Image (spheres, rainbow, N blue to C red):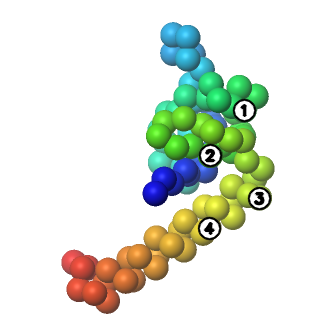
């Protein structure tokens, strides 16, 4: 199973021949290659998998995805706690 995460571009830059971006994932910042999304600009949301931005998302779609990922994370934590996997 693969999971792509939406994040917002905060900076674009070149790393040699590669167009790169700093991506903010709800406070966690990482880098991704944006060669597959050449029109993505600072402020745009992109869907990132394995260090590559694969698709530009509109803000509503990105925020809905982030809400769902947060909900799933909370469900998984609750399941761990009830199964005795919590601290």
Marks 3 and 2, how far apart at CA: 13 Å
Disc 3 versus disc 1: distance between alpha carbons?
16 Å
- Secondary-structure class at tag 4: helix
In the image, residue 69 above or below residue 56: below
- Which element type, helix, strand or loop, lies under badge 2? strand
Q: Earlier in the sequence, mark 4 or mark 1?
A: 1
Query: From the viewer's perspective, is residue 10 above or below residue 83?
Result: above
Q: CA distance from mark 4 to mark 2?
A: 14 Å
Residue at 28% x, 87% y is 83
Q: If the image is split into quadrants, where does the C terminus sit? A: bottom left
Q: Earlier in the sequence, mark 1 or mark 2?
A: 1
Residue at (56% x, 43% y) in the render: 48
Badge 4 crowding class, 10 Å Cα cut-off, few under 14, some 14 to 19, many 20 or more, is few
> Does 61 sit left or right of 1 as displayed?
right
Residue hosting label 3:
60
Which callout, 4 or 2, points at the residue further toward the start of the chain? 2
Q: Is residue 15 among what the camera can see?
A: yes
Above or below: residue 30 compared with residue 79: above
Q: Is residue 15 above or below residue 57?
A: above
Q: For mark 1, what is the residue? A: 40
Is residue 24 at least partly visible in the picture? no
Residue 11 picture quarter: top right
Q: Which mark is residue 47?
A: 2
Q: Position of residue 22 (x, y in %)?
A: 55, 33
The outermost residue toward the front is 1
Residue tagged by mark 4?
A: 67
């Amino acid at each position: 199973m693969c999971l792509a995460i939406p994040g917002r571009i905060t900076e674009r830059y070149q790393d040699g021949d590669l167009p790169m971006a700093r991506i903010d994932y709800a406070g966690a910042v990482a880098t991704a290659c944006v060669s597959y999304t050449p029109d993505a600009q600072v402020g745009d949301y992109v869907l990132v998998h394995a260090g590559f931005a694969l698709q530009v998302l509109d803000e509503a779609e990105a925020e809905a995805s982030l809400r769902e990922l947060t909900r799933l994370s909370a469900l998984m934590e609750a399941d761990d706690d009830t199964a005795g996997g919590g601290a």
